[in-house]
Image (cartoon, rainbow, N blue to C red):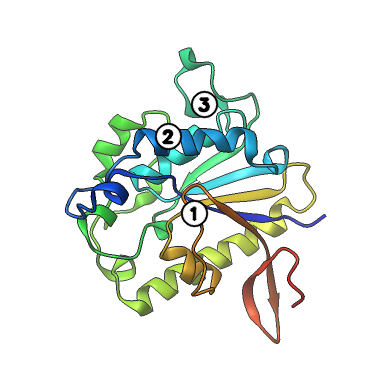
Amino acid sequence: MASQIHIIRHAESVHNVSKDFSQLDPSLTPLGFEQAAKLDQTFPHSPRVGIIITSPLRRAIQTTLAAFPNVLDKRYFDPSSGYGIENGASLVIDPDLQERSALRCDTGSDRETLEKAFPGLNFHGLGEVWPAKEGIFSADDEAVHERARRVRRSLLDLNEQLNDKEKRDVVIVTHGVFMKFLTEEPEIDLPKAGWKSYTVRNDKVHGLMLVPIGANI
C-alpha cells in the first residue's frame, strides 16, 4: 500500500477562545490539550506513521507532542516522562507549515524561546529569517502558494523514500488557513484536532497534488 498523508489541524489555542489576535504565538487551552491527547486513542493510522512534520508555532508543536506520545521516538521527550518509544517516528519542524497571516498570533516565537520550551526538539531547520513574516514566509498569496508547493514536493520525495517501509505514512500538523493552500481545497475546514487523509500524486494531467483518500481522480 502506498504512503498516506494525514493532515491534522492543531487543537484549540488561547486566541481561538479569547479572540485576542495580538498575543504572540499562543499556547493550547486546557481543552486543546485534551483534544490533542484524545488523538492518541482515536487516530487510527498510528502504527503506520514513520514521520511527523509540524509547524513551528507553539500550538502545533504542543498538539503534536500531546497527540503522539506512543508514536514519536523517545528522544523528543523528557526521559522521566515515560513518553516516546524506541525506534519511533521522526519529528521534523518545518517553517513552511506556519499559518498564513502576519498577525502576532500567527507569528512564531524566536528559536531560543522554542528551544527552552521544547528542549528535546531540533529547530535548526528554521533558518535565519525565522520568525519574520517576510519573503517566502509573508502573508502574500504568491508566497503562501509557493510554501504549499514546496511542502507538496517534499511529500512526494518522502512518499518515494518510505514506500517500501512498514511505517510509511506521514502526519502533517498545521493550521486552518494554510491547509487550504496545501490541499488546494478552499472549502476545507477541519475541526480543532481533526484530520483528513490523502495520497500524493504527480501526473501530466493534474500535476503535483494531494488526492483525498477515496476520491476518484
Q: Can see residue 65?
A: no
* Nearer to the camera, 163 or 56: 56
Residue at the image point whose x is 19% and y is 48% from the top: 23
Label 3 crowding class (10 Å Cα cut-off): few <14, some 14-19, many 20+? some
Residue at the image point whose x is 35% and y is 51% from the top: 126
Whole-angstrom CA distance, mark 3 to mark 2, is: 21 Å
Q: Residue furthest left?
A: 22
Q: Quadrant of the N terminus?
A: bottom right
Q: Earlier in the sequence, mark 3 or mark 2?
A: 2
Give SS at disc 1. loop
In the picture shown, does residue 79 fall above or below 72?
Answer: above
* Nearer to the camera, 133 or 13: 13
In the picture shown, does residue 40 fall above or below 78?
Answer: below
Marking on residue 75? 3
- Where in the figure is residue 193, as x and y percent of width and height? 50, 47
* Nearer to the camera, 122 or 34: 34
Q: Amino acid at mark 2?
A: Phe
Q: Amino acid at mark 3?
A: Arg
- Where in the figure is residue 132, as x and y percent of width and height? 23, 59
Mark 1 lies on residue: 191
In the picture shown, does residue 154 fall above or below 47?
Answer: below
Q: Amino acid at mark 1?
A: Pro
Residue at the image point whose x is 62% and y is 75% from the top: 208
Q: Earlier in the sequence, mark 1 or mark 2?
A: 2
Task: Tell which tag, 3 or 2, sits nearer the viewer.
Answer: 2
Q: Can see residue 163?
A: yes
- Where in the figure is residue 86, as x and y percent of width and height? 64, 24
Q: Is residue 102 left or right of residue 202?
A: left
Q: Quadrant of residue 100?
A: bottom left
